[in-house]
Image (cartoon, rainbow, N blue to C red):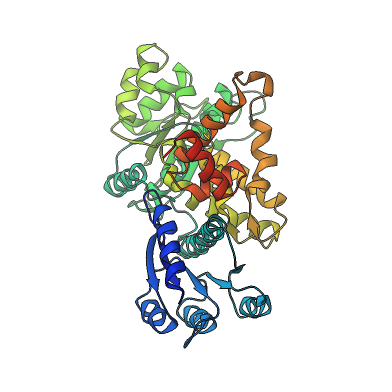
Amino acid sequence: MPGYAPAILLVDDDQRQLELLTEVFTDHAYRVTACSGGDEALVMLDDGGFDTVVTDLKMPGLDGTTVLEAARRGDPELPVIVITGYGTVDSAIAAMKIGAYDYIEKPFDPEELVYVVARAVEHYRLVRTNRELAAEVASLRPEELIGDSAPMRQVKDMIQRLASLDVPVLISGETGTGKELVARLLHRASTRAKGRFLAVNCAAFSEPLLESELFGHEKGAFTGAVSTKKGIFEAAAGGTLFLDEVNSMSPALQARLLRVLQEGVFLRVGGTREIATDIRLLGATNADLKAEVEAGRFRDDLYYRLNVMTIELPPLRKRGDDIPRLAYHFLRRFAGEYGKEVTAIDSGAVARLMAHSWPGNVRELENVVGRAVIMAAGPTLTAGDLSAVLDADAPAATDLPLMPLAEMERLMIKKALHVTGGNRSRAAALLGIDASTLWRKMKRWQLS
């Protein structure tokens, strides 16, 4: 999370080293709690709130193994890194067997420890995030609008306000933003919920076929009409009809639709008897319908009939906070469909997803995660699993601007920090380098 300072518990009976490590981690934007022995560390662990623990293994009184065991009792996922002296690696390995995240042998470079800790903190963040996402996704109903970003909270609020009002609603948004899902949610929460919900993509039919699909036809109305057929306006009676890409309707069909909305009656193709219908109409468009009216391609009277109320869906690039939730939702679904034991998404994969512009919106994200699950070699979806999918859409090398390599490096680091909200671990994962390397390059380029 942007601006979040990880909390670290340092435990060492060597006061000089404790002060040195406190200074190092403070300089790296950690919130440090320093303890000079195991007894004090156990009290601090009871209070909780740490993202990682670094403890010397050999200490008088309660040693590092005791600290490790206490930490794991409080939170089995909390990463504990043990520091071991020369010649006591066997003890460190024993600590690993009972759950230590990693060990580092004296003497060590403080930057090396910083890197190990950054990796541990990111691992812990990943574990907690995936745990939270799993709980959140498990609580969702089969059809649910996923997302808690500010734009999506506004959309959910509009759905709640409009669901029970039996008026037309125009749902606008780019292709792939989930307009049909919003329509289904409006129907499900409406007074017509026990009726049918029928959806028609107007752009998928020629004019004659769409006319027959919507209004039905009488026997002999045209070649091939060997029997009378009821249209969707009859089939959806008492329920909800969703017309997607309504802007693609021809002027003649726009006129027929307007009459249904005004009078509540229609004629089958080739028919002479008026048929009453009782439906709630929801329309959707990925075009600027007002601009279509001004250009003479859409009837203004139909526009005002459809546009009683509007719900505008934001593109995915404007609701980036929702990407991890959506990705985890799709991961669970595709893992089940494909029978793969993929249960988590690592920080590098999240960073890669967050950095993408998503021109195809949620539908593109769904496609990418599905293909990445197929590519996944282990239980965690990685940036490498996404590479084969996303790189296929990357610009060719000949399309990239020429500039000095050093300047390209500076720009890429700056962009990685921007898209990850300043999270160095995720930025490093996105760039394919370790955290300490990123830190050195940031100092070189004076990036904060």
| 55 horizontally vs 378: left or right | left
Image label count: 0
- Which quarter of the figure is the C terminus placed in? top left
Q: Is 377 situated left or right of 199 in this image?
A: right
Q: In this view, does 228 lie above or below 165?
A: above
Q: Position of residue 130 (x, y in %)?
A: 51, 61
Tell which residue pokes out farthest to the bottom in this image: 61
State the residue lying farthest toward the top. 295
Q: Is the residue 45 above or below the residue 255 in the image?
A: below
Decide which of 23, 82 is in the foreground and name it.
Answer: 23
Position of residue 391 measured from the top left corner of the image (x, y, whole percent): 66, 35
Task: Inspect this view and state whether residue 231 appears.
Answer: no
Q: Is residue 39 left or right of residue 371?
A: left
Whether residue 174 is visible here, answered yes or no, is: yes
In which quadrant of the rendered view does residue 155 lie?
top left
At x 61%, y 79%, the residue is 95
Q: Nearer the viewer, residue 20 or 6?
A: 20
**Location of residue 152 in the rendering, given as x and y in whole percent from the top left corner:** 36, 45
Q: Residue at x 44, y 62 (%)?
A: 20
From the viewer's side, name the closer residue of 425 and 227.
425
- x then y, percent, for residue 63: 51, 83
Question: In the image shown, does 83 or 419 lie closer to the viewer?
Answer: 83
